[in-house]
Image (cartoon, grey):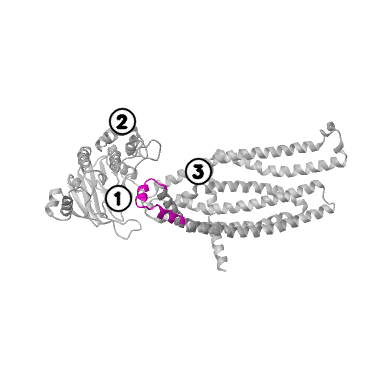
Amino acid sequence: MRIHFATITKLAHGLAQLPYLPRILALVWTAARGWTLAWSGLLLIQALLPVATVYLTRAAVDSLAFMAASGGVGRELDSIWSEPILIWGALLFGAALGNECTRGAMSWVQTAQAERVQDHIRSLIHRKSMQVDLAFYDSPDSYDRLHRARDEAESRPLALIHHIGILLQYSLTLLAMGAALAPFGLWLPIALLVSTLPAFIAMIRSGMRYHQWWLRTTAEERRTWYYDWLLTAGEPAAELRLFGLGRRFQAAYQSLRQKLRIENLQLAKTQSRAEVMAGALAVGITATAYGWMIWQARQGIWTLGEIALFYQAFHQGQRFMRGILDHAGQIYSNILFLESLFDFLALQPRVIDTAKPVRIPGALRQGIGFRQVSFRYPGSRGLALDRFNLDIPAGQMVAIVGGSGAGKSTLVKLLCRLYDPDAGRIEIEGIDIRHYPLAELRQMMTVLFQSPVHYQATVTDNIGLGHGAGQAWQPTAASVRAAARAADAEAIIDRLPEGYDTMLGKRFDEGTELSGGQWQHLALARACWRQVPIILLDEPTSAMDPWSEADWMERFRTYAAARTAILITHRMTMAMRADIIHVMRHGRIVESGCHRQLLAKGEFYAQAWAAQVERGSDVSATS
């Protein structure tokens, strides 16, 4: 009883997904309207041709029997050409040829339709991935949802449309076949349904089981993808070889794949057993119908043409009925899987524009303020910022230092509105940044994150990508060189094989790989490309040597003149050049002042400075 109740519950859940069907059809119509119309026309032709073939076969057989009874078989060749059998034969040949032509045309149309639908769905997923909040990527459950949406996005909608098309085609054909069989007995269409219904039930149950298994194993499937990436990607290749980690990750991959493979095979075994039992029942019903046909023929009730029509109509009717139920089951199964796609596409960001946004200022005169800001990352127990307060005057260069986990990088993310604070407010020119249009807010900032992206593109594109979505794409040679000069990247670029036209990275042909420090110089140049009033740099020199850092800092002061700059850094040698330094611990400011003032206090900053001086290097502080 418990199993029966669980099956009913799963079936009810599946039926609840049927409203997705119109949305899927609308999606396909939007993506490939013309090709869908052509597909529908060919579908109708393919549905009617088998029925035409059955009736033509009866006419041809009856004509052949009449010709044989009247002695026409032995006539001269000239007189045979006038017999109706040739007309029916020619029409049968035409129907067969039309079937092959429409089949070939359908293959071409479906390929064109599939390409457009795939690109449209990818576009929807890409657009939604860019819309969701950054908090989406802080949850393992979100990664599962994205994996399920992306994993099924390309194949399921197309498979669904394919099955719907065949279902419609077979339904039209079956109706015509039923009309052909009705004169022989109304019980025959019922026999067709009963002979194929068990297979349909088996398919529905199998689809539900597989869908539940697929949902349950998403995290494990993602982990196999991760192990596969570790074993095949270039980024971890050096460590895998140095520490001999290849066998470990390969064993982990094989262990997970074996578990998933065994479970999948068990599902397939259960499905096969059910299909065999359903097939045996179908064979018994078919044998009964054919036995009745033979008995009718022995009684002389039917003509040869009628026997041929019955045999073809029942045989093809059974095939089409089985096909209808089979494809109905596939439609049901695909709708279950597409729930994940529409669930992902339905996500709505929380960091959005207010109903009545305020016009953003063209330049800063007051500055930036954090007012009693508290923030906790999604899924985290501790606060990243705890009633945080800070004033950053306009036109100053401010350094924020502190140990790892102090909350420094969080300031940059909140100021860019990648997240919104849980409490308090962040102000620019005395106005809560949530009142500014989000796109315009981000356009007034240039940012270098702690781990900048290494774009596999030319040097010019790597720098020019800093233009921002709201600005015209004008990476002129002069502007790119100016940004490279501000980031002290000119010497690096001049040594590359093709200079500013050099393709960077090793993913594509003729690419040149850079060192970590060189990549960081280019990321800085990308940040310097934007001429905006607020500059946010998170560990901008972490991969640079001390000589490069000192040279870059002098250039940066010139670039940042009259702008408001926030430097997140562990390096005291960089922080000492700022107008004011703030020291963070446990999500709060604990010290503020210039370099000399903080040394005179002899507290956290002074201790970190002394530690760096003692080591005789410019490495990161560990206060």
Tell me: residue 80, above or below residue 401: above
Asked if residue 190 lies left or right of residue 296, the reply is left
Picture coordinates of residue 309, whole percent (x, y): 76, 47
Q: In which quadrant of the rendered view does residue 520 lie?
A: top left
Which disc, if any, is residue 414? 1
For badge 2, the amino acid type reads Ala
The residue positioned 24% from the left and 53% from the top of the image is: 371
Circles 3 and 2 in contact, beta carbons < 8 Å: no
Q: Is residue 52 left or right of residue 250?
A: right
Q: Earlier in the sequence, mark 1 or mark 2?
A: 1
| Residue 438 percent location from the top left of the image | 34, 45
Q: Which residue is identified by label 2? A: 477
- Residue neighbourhood size for the residue with mark 1, other residues' Cα within 10 Å, grouped as few (<14), some (14–19), many (≥20): some
Please name whichever residue, 419 or 359, is drawn nearer the observer in this view of the structure: 419
Which numbered dot is residue 118?
A: 3
Name which of mark 3 and mark 1 comes first in the sequence: 3
Locate residue 282: give its quadrant: bottom right
Q: Are marks 3 and 1 in contact (CB under 8 Å)?
A: no
Q: Amino acid at mark 1?
A: Leu
State which region is magenta: 232-254
* Horizontal and vertical percent position of residue 481: 28, 33
Q: Nearer the viewer, residue 24 or 254?
A: 254
* Distance from Cα at disc 3 to Cα at disc 1: 36 Å
